[in-house]
Amino acid sequence: MDLTDRGPAADHPRHVIGADRLLDVPGVRNVRDVGGHTTTDGATVRTGLLHRSGRLTDLTPEGARVLGKLGVRTVVDLRDPAEIDRWPDRLYELDAVTAHHPLLPQDGEDHYGKPLDEAYRLLTDTAAATLPPLFTRLVAPGALPALVHCAVGRDRTGIVVAVLLSALGVADRDIVDDFLLSNLGLGVLDGPQEYEDANGVVRLTEAVGPELITGFLATVRARYGSPAALLADQGLGEAGLARLRELFLAPA
């Protein structure tokens, strides 16, 4: 994790779709631009507006300069307060505002040892409360360009990006490809890696398959109609959704 990383590992090809999208930001893992995808109606998701990554705890001064060149104004941190206390982000001279939007339930329970499928169900259950305020922040004047991250930039970050891309009209196959790119970005295609959770417990990060993000999207559609409807109906509003599309889409 992100949450726990004991999800089912799938067989992954050595050639990973979108591998050239991964960026070198010293001290940060799994960095890439969310833009560049084509929507089902031929529009293009603008690049340079939103990046995704793992936590910025080990960001170096050189890495902060790279983020500065990317124009990052807002850093959206999806982690729990306990994670932030244990591994605070470093920004150095980066002129950016940090916004905390925890996606896991803030109910005092220990969610870090849960199997990934259960963790994703929790994230789905809280999505109506957590995601619209986050997207409201992104469409606020001056918020973009932004960077969104969790611990390793895969699960919680992957959900935010999947909702954004789906709401913009990107096909599920491209959303899945973007999600699976984290396997390469985290270096887990050749085997699991150890990490320490916020309670000091050593766990394993393993490669994941598409079922986690496709299952999340399927549940959102069953409950709300679509990720776009989730955002619009639960707080962003139709005007906010229209603004999101205006900001992020370059017409065909």
Image (spheres, rainbow, N blue to C red):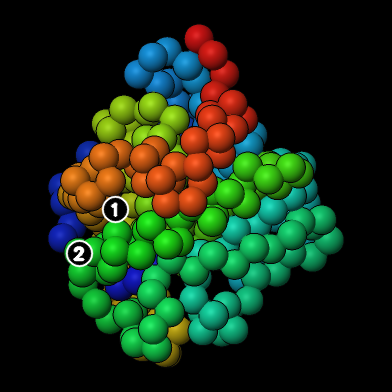
At x 39% / y 71%, what residue is drawn? 104
The amino acid on which the numbered mark 2 sits, given as a three-letter code, is Asp
Q: Is residue 25 visible?
A: no
**Mark 2 or mark 1: which comes first in sequence?**
2
Q: In the shown orientation, is residue 155 left or right of residue 9?
A: right
The amino acid on which the numbered mark 1 sits, given as a three-letter code, is Leu
Q: Quadrant of residue 58?
A: bottom right
Q: Is residue 245 visible?
A: yes
Q: Nearer the viewer, residue 245 or 15?
A: 245
Relative to residue 112, is residue 45 depicted above or below?
A: above
Q: Quadrant of residue 91?
A: bottom right
Q: In the shown orientation, is residue 94 left or right of residue 16?
A: right
At x 64% / y 34%, what residue is drawn? 48
The numbered dot on residue 189 is: 1
* Residue 161 placement (x, y as % from top left): 44, 45
Q: Quadrant of the N terminus?
A: bottom left
Residue where numbered disc 2 is placed: 117
At x 64% / y 63%, what residue is drawn? 99
Q: CA distance from mark 2 to mark 1?
A: 20 Å
